[in-house]
Image: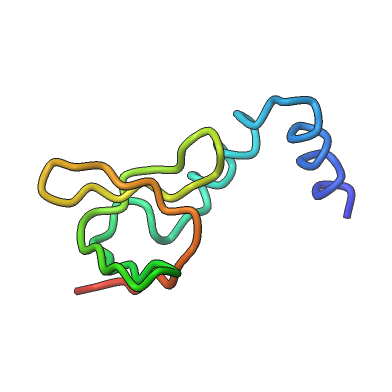
Amino acid sequence: LARLRRYYGYIESGSSREVISAWLRLSSTVGKVVRVVTVDGREITGRAVGVDGLGRLVVEESGVRHHIEAGDVYHLR
């Protein structure tokens, strides 16, 4: 709970860099090839390359970067 409180404090103060840095260190998705099905039914297949400043997953598909706010993410082999 103390760690959650600390990270929540970063977000409240507008300093999401610490949260995103920790997220990237612990992520099992970033760097992997994924298929994303968005809430509106679009399918995007590409490499998860990071998380943006708003906490959205960034997936690169054929040179285009998509910022995924919500959806189902599947790791591909």
- The residue positioned 31% from the left and 47% from the top of the image is 66
- The residue positioned 80% from the left and 33% from the top of the image is 12
Front-most of residues 70 and 22: 70
Q: Colour scheme in the image? A: rainbow
- The residue positioned 28% from the left and 59% from the top of the image is 32
Q: Quadrant of the N terminus?
A: bottom right
Instruction: Pinpoint residue 24: horizontal percent, then vertical percent.
Output: 48, 44
Q: Quadrant of residue 9?
A: top right
- The residue positioned 38% from the left and 46% from the top of the image is 67
Label tally: 0
Q: Quadrant of residue 50?
A: top left
Front-most of residues 64 and 19: 64
In the image, residue 65 sits, relative to residue 44, either above or below, namely above
Instruction: Pinpoint residue 72: horizontal percent, then vertical percent.
Output: 43, 72
Instruction: Pinpoint residue 28: horizontal percent, then vertical percent.
Output: 43, 61
Left or right of 74? Residue 53 is right
Q: Residue furthest left?
A: 62
Instruction: Pinpoint residue 27: horizontal percent, then vertical percent.
Output: 47, 55
Q: Quadrant of the C terminus?
A: bottom left
Left or right of 41? Residue 63 is left
